[in-house]
Amino acid sequence: MSRRPRAERAARMAPLAVLPVFLKLKGRRVIVAGGSEAAVWKAELLAAAGADVAVLADEPCPAMLDLVAAPPAGSIALHHRAWTPADLAGAAFAIGAFEEDEAAGAFAAAARAAGVPVNVIDKPAFCDVQFGGIVNRSPLVIGISTDGAAPVFGQAVRARIEALLPQGFSRWAEAARRWRRRVQSLDLPFQARRRFWELFSERAMATPEAMPPACLAISLEQGAREIGAARTGRIVLVGAGPGDPELLTMRAVRALQSADVIVHDDLVPPAVLDVARREAERISAGKRGRGPSCRQEDINDLVIRLAAEGKHVVRLKAGDPMIFGRAGEEIAAAEARGIPVEVVPGISAAQGAAASLKLSLTHRDHARRLQYVTAHGRDGRLPRDLSWPALTDPAASTIVYMPGATWHELAAGLIETGMSGATPAIAVANATRPDEVRIHGTIADLAGRLAARAWSGPLLILYGQAFGAAPQDDIAAALSAVPTPV
């Protein structure tokens, strides 16, 4: 049986504890009521955003006096008095620093009555707006919030992003701001304009600490014009890896986040698709080893048609597209129509399973070579042209792809050809995913163990002497990784 590719909606936004927004405060009046140490940081932050900050405090602390005397940015004016409701009229934002809930509640109520968003420091019950962690590569700014649930965790996330995000990105973001109006003024179609910014981003990622040269805008503009003149899209074959989204390559992530359309196999899990650009159309190609699937010819025609319409098409395949992924057929079909194709390799299912098992595929005491073989031919049966001498080589590690329906026949052939039935064999379903299942055995008894055990999803079987040292468990990998409570 076969079915046709079908379009899907992108997953709806999961519930948010807070709505992340960015306030434009340049030249706008902001009120800070209170002169404590806690108020100092908020006043400085507001001034850095370009606000005209009015601090209202009877007894400002020394740090506040120092800040007002020499603000590092913006404008801060100190008024030696308590706040009044009249101060809030026309303000863009109001922040209060109060010890007592009664005073905090009065300030919050007055701000809301004046239509002003309010934050009361360290008193979330009185806040319309909360401050999160900030990673500053202005004009690139990243905000981090845990909705007050775990501030230390939020700080740890901020530290991780700080370590990963080069300081030079601020220069690239500033260059983007300078060039944006010029790009918008060019007579370029939408696809070409977006390609300009894709090329810009690729250059920034590759050389984050370099100063963006002025001539780069001309070079990128020419590249974008060529895209616009061609009026033909492009196809990128992307390896989704075995299922864990953290195993996607950076190049795969960039492709997913710039795609117009993603044509994906059923074996690609939702967690990987969640990485993609939300506006991208998602189309399931329905490729499964056991069950109704889309015909390869229909998939080829769909991908080529979409690219011919000028779209950036990502053909997303589980594992690595060049390993039993029919990539050769899709590349040949696209190139025959003159459509450019790029390939982004992925972590193969075999690599993912071996890493999860913590077993070397090429252990020098047991394996002299590594071989991948498919147990699923064009007709869905065990291929008739397998090399049995190679498959029974005791010095090889063998990875069998798509063995779910034919392993019993393959195992019988191995034993009949002379391989020891005691040779270690491991079945791994959903390698690297939270629901990973491992079933240990030998080539003689693994078929029975598979039949007795409930499993679903993509399956690999690894056999050879290199796999004899695997821990004898068959629980989900996620459970085996959970630390024991103390």
Image (tube, grey):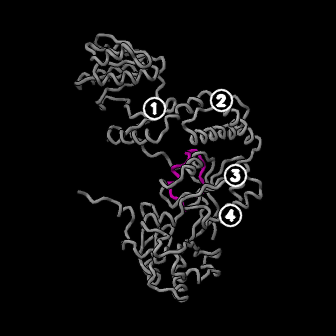
Residue 328's tag is: 4
Q: Which residue is mark 1?
A: 136
The percent coordinates of residue 243 (x first, y second) are: 49, 59
Whether residue 265 is visible here, answered yes or no, is no
Q: Secondary structure at mark 3?
A: helix
Q: Earlier in the sequence, mark 2 or mark 1?
A: 1
User: What is the CA distance from the residue labelled 4 to the residue labelled 2?
Assistant: 41 Å
Q: Nearer the viewer, mark 2 or mark 1?
A: 2
Q: Nearer the viewer, mark 3 or mark 1?
A: 1
Q: Which residues are magenta?
A: 263-282
Label 3 with label 1: CB-CB less than 8 Å: no
Q: Which residue is mark 2?
A: 214
Residue 306's tag is: 3
User: What is the CA distance from the residue labelled 1 to the residue labelled 4?
Assistant: 45 Å
Tag 3: amino acid: Leu
The percent coordinates of residue 46 (x first, y second) are: 41, 22
> Is 216 contained in the magenta span?
no
**Which image quarter: residue 384?**
bottom right
Tag 4: amino acid: Gly
Q: Residue at x 48, y 24 (%)?
A: 24
**Which image quarter: residue 90?**
top left
Toward the viewer: 440 or 464?
464
